[in-house]
Structure formats: C-alpha cells, structure tokens
Amino acid sequence: MRKLLIYLKPQRKRIVCATLLMAISVLCNLALPTIMSSILDNGVYRSAVENTFPYTAKMCGVMLAVALVSLASVILGYRLTSRITTSFTRDLRSAIFHKVHTMTFEEMGKIGTGGLVTRSTHDAGTLAWVASMLSGNIFIIPLLFIGGVALCFSKDVTLSLIMLAMVPLVIVVVVLLGKKITPRWELSDKYCDRQNDIVRERIRGIRVIRAFNREPREHERIAEATHVMAENIIKANTTMALTVPMTTFVLHIAVLLIVLVGGIRIETGSDLTPGDVFAVIQYVELVLNALISASFAIIMFPHAKVAARRIGEVMDAEGTADLIPDEDIRFTGRIDFEDASFRYQGADQAALSHITLHINPGDKISVIGGTGSGKSTLVSLLLSFRQPTEGRVLFDGRDAKTISRKAIRRNISCALQKSMIYSGTVRENVQMGRMDASEEEIRQALDIAQLTDFISEQKDGIDYALEQSGTNLSGGQKQRLAIARCIIKDAPIYIFDDSFSALDFLTEAKLRTRLNSQFDGRTQIVITQRVTSAMNSDCIFVLDEGRLVGAGKHAELLKTCKIYREIFASQTGGGRK
Ligand SMILES: Nc1ncnc2c1ncn2[C@@H]1O[C@H](COP(=O)(O)OP(=O)(O)OP(=O)(O)O)[C@@H](O)[C@H]1O
Ligand SMILES: [Mg+2]
C-alpha cells in the first residue's frame, strides 16, 4: 500500500490545503453547539425575565457566519479532495498500464486479462478511497474526536463519562466486523476477475456463439459467474452495512442516557443548564460520528489492502525490464539458431527442440510445418518475446541475450499470425510501423500489400475508419493491412507469420513479387503451412513437432525430407512436382 501511495506525492500541496479546509470546517462545527447552548441559556430561557432579543439576534448572526464558513470550507475541501483522488487514480492507472507493458507473457497469463483489467479499473478505484481519506478526512477525525471530548468535559464531566463509556462498544463492533470482512473482500474480488474474464471472452467470441446458437447456454454461464460474484459482494457489503447502523444505535443509547441523566440532574438542582445538556448531546453526536467515520475507514481499509495487494502483484512483477543498454546497431540480416529449445511454462513437451539453423543476410527463407509444429514459437524467440530454455539465438554472431530487446525489435519487422488491427484509421494502423511515414510511403506500402483497390473504393481513402479489432475488414484485408504495417518499417529482417493464409493465390503471387523486388537484400522469413508459399524460397526449413526435420530448396526437400513430401502430397494430391 505504502509503495502505491507514492502516486499521492505530486498532490502534497493540495492535500495540505484540503486538510486545512477540512480542519476549519471541524473547528466551526465544534463551535456551533457552544454558541447554540449560549443562545438557549442566555437568550431564549432568560427572555421571560429580561429583553434578550439583541443578544439572541447577535449570536444568531455569529452562528450563521460560522455555519457559512464551515459550508464554504467543506465545499472547497471536497473539490480539492476530488481533484486529488482523480489525479491519483489517473497516475496509478497509467503506472499499472505501463507496468503491464513490461510484464512477461507468463506473468500476464498468471493474472489473466480480466484480472489486469479489474486491477487497473476497480482496484485502482478502491485505492482512490484511500487517497480521499488521506487528503484531509483521516486527519480531521482525531481533531473532531479530541475537540468534541474536550468541549464535552468543559460542559459536564458526568455526561462526558457516559459518552466515553460508549467508545469501547463502538470499537468492539468495528473490530469484530473488520475481522469478518477481509476474506469476503478477497473472495468477491477474485470472482469479479473471473466474471470479467468470462464476459470479455464471450463478447469477443459473440460471432461463434451466434453461429452455433449457443446464446442460451452462454447466457447461463455468464449469469452463473455473475451470480457467484454478486453473492460474494452481497456478503461483503452486508457485513459492511452493519457498521453504520450498529454504531448509530450506540449513539442513540448514549443520547438517551445523557437526556435521562441530564434531566434528573437539572431537576435535582445541580448547576447543569438545559443549554449544557443540548451542547453535550451535540458534542456526543460529533464525537460518535467521528468514531463512525473512523470505523468506516477501518472497515474499508481491508478492502483497500486487498486492492493494494492485487495491484502490487502487477507492480512487483519482475517483468522483462531490458537490463542491457540500448545500442544503435543495424543487423546485416544473418540469423543463427544454435541448438535452441523452448518449453512453455507448465507444458509437458518442448515446443521447439534442439533447433540449429543458419540464415544468411538477404536470404528469402520459409518455415513450413503443420499446425502446432512450433513456427510461431520460433518467431517469439526471434523477437525476444521469449528466451530459449536451452541453446542460443544469434544475430550477426551475437547472442540475442546480449542485445537489448529494443535494438532487436528495431531490426525486425513482423506481421504476426493474429493480424491485430486497432480502432482508428487505415493510416494510423500503417503508421504504427513507422510513425514518421509520409502519405506517399503509406500509399506505397498499401499498394505493395495489394490494398490499393480497397482503399480507392473508400470515400475517406487511407483515412477509412476502422472499428475495434478491425471488425469492418475481411480476414484477408486485415492480413494485408498488417503486411502494410510490417513493410513500412525499414528493417534488415522481415517476418511474415502465416500472413498470406487468407489471400487467394493470385493476390499472394502479386504481393510476393512486389515484396521480393522491393526488399531485395533484406532477410525475409515466411512462415507458412502452404507449399506454394514456400517453394520458391532460397531455403525451406521444415518443422515437425518442434523439431527441424529438413532444410533446403524445394526440389532437394522433395527427395530428402519425408515430412515435406507428405505436406506437398497432401496439398497437391501427390501428382505435381
Ligand atoms: N502460450 C502458450 N502456452 C503453452 N503452450 C503453447 C503456447 N503457445 C503455443 N503453445 C504450444 O506450443 C506448440 C507450438 O505452437 P506454435 O504456436 O508455435 O505452433 P505453430 O506452428 O505456429 O502452429 P500454427 O500453424 O497453428 O500457427 C503447440 O503445441 C502449442 O500448443
Ligand atoms: Mg503459428
């Protein structure tokens, strides 16, 4: 929690001002009962024996002025508090988002997408409450309590002792409820993550659900998750909701006793006045209200602690911090895998085993293999998304582990298998490849990617608006847009992971011809399952169940590699060579 509160540091000045304003309001509130008591004793009750109207009117004026000062300071204080909490959550959310960018895929997988979303929204919101408490509220509680008790004693000791007797009762109630509530918050937050995950996944996959008429079943599943989440939130909130009524009940008992004892003492002729009893009741309300606020804070604190721990899981993730200093290097395009293996965390088998291969600068190579053979994993190793569990990946003879990830990724441009398109325009999506690309360069990249016809059909041209995840594009259009984004970047190595699978043969042929002429001299790695996409490469690497089972040109592989022959036969009916 303390670590997260550093995001309050820039708000120091505002916190001091808010606390001062709140303190002014508390002092005013403490003054009001005394003024009121004086109006009652010296004005109202004595009006029968002398003309006290001028005094009463004057004191009413003072009371109004004090009330107005209190009102103004509360309004200003709350405005400041609201600014403080919003700025705090803004900074905290931005820090969480930043951190997520540096997390390893394993760390992200452990928390889950839903968990990451709830941590930066719901949990950050819960911590906003802590920020609001710290920006004034928490400091005025002791002031209200001590001031109230002191003023109460100044009026009457016996009545004050009645009030003090109630304090331990409030503390017991709060401690008991506080103990119960922490595990409930933990559970309700866990189920909130789960519900978030399920809803997110079902909304993303709504097309499949509709296509298979699975709406009722999926609706049931979401309702089930929401029900479990709601049950847990209800339990937590019910425990919490008990705090205020129970402490208020104690307050009422206190008032009752004070009226009773105060009444008896006035009757029996002590020097206690009705105004004093009135003032004491007001102070008891103030003091016990301070206690109720404190108990509310104590009850809320476990929830904030849970939220802080959950956010801490993100912030404390080791992440993939690039410990190697960035270098302004440009690779020639030579790549070597030296006995490289990789196993996903928790997987029984290695996704890549003992891969040794060499790619020369400017080579146009292909990696072919059935589904799950490890092709995309190979791309992950190249991009340093993952590190080989054994062996090495080398660029220009240098171990990738000794080169900063930034430098590696600057030297590789990649169209990943899942063509991620972001909401925005075609232009913005292409510019992700190179921010300073001119309009002419964007148009050229789109032309090479065979998107010119599509763009010219759009009224807005390259400013055609794309919906989230590019849902208003076809699969092939998304792939081609991802290719345009990849080729606009100037890099010595280009990787296309299954980037032509949704293109018809003619479009692919045109695109590949343009790529080859435009990027002659650059290393091109085409990952594919189609022999037709691979057959003209300088070298084809054949993967099977994570092992490299063949390397060479098309004709060679047909003679030497059984797996390649099988793939070829399955795609051509075995006849054509
Ligand atoms: N994040 C992951 N966690 C655990 N296992 C994974 C993960 N990603 C892939 N795998 C496993 O690693 C193996 C290789 O996967 P990979 O994605 O590299 O295959 P691929 O050759 O690219 O397949 P495709 O042609 O279908 O894209 C598969 O058995 C897969 O189940
Ligand atoms: Mg793949």
Image (tube, rainbow, N blue to C red):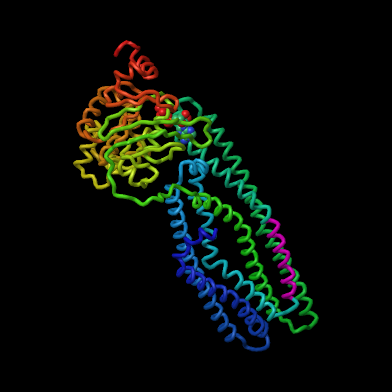
Q: How many numbered marks are there?
A: 0
Residue 512 magenta-highlighted: no
Residue ranking furthest to the right: 268
Front one among 296 and 47: 296
* Residue 259 rendering spot, x and y as whole percentages: 74, 72
Of 296 and 116, the residue lying toward us: 116
**Quadrant in which the C terminus appears:** top left
Residue 91, compared with residue 26, is above or below; it is above
The N terminus sits in image quarter: bottom right
Left or right of residue 277, residue 111 in this image? left
Asked whether residue 205 is in view, the answer is: no
Q: Which residue ends up furthest to the bottom in the rendered image?
A: 50
Q: Position of residue 501 (x, y in %)?
A: 34, 26
Dominant secondary structure (helix, strand or loop) of the stretch shown in magenta? helix
* Viewer can see residue 201: yes
Magenta residues? 159-177
Name the residue located 22 percent from the left edge and 35 percent from the top edge. 521
Residue at image position (61%, 56%) is 302
Q: Residue at x 54, y 50 (%)?
A: 310
User: Is residue 527 or residue 445 the one in the foreground?
Assistant: 527
Q: Nearer the viewer, residue 548 or 36?
A: 548
Q: From the viewer's perspective, is residue 429 above or below residue 155?
A: above
| Residue 558 quadrant | top left
Residue 2 appears at what percent x and percent y? 54, 60
Q: Would residue 531 be found to the left or right of residue 444 on screen?
A: right
Per the image, is 160 magenta? yes
Percent from the top left, x then y, of residue 494?
Answer: 29, 36
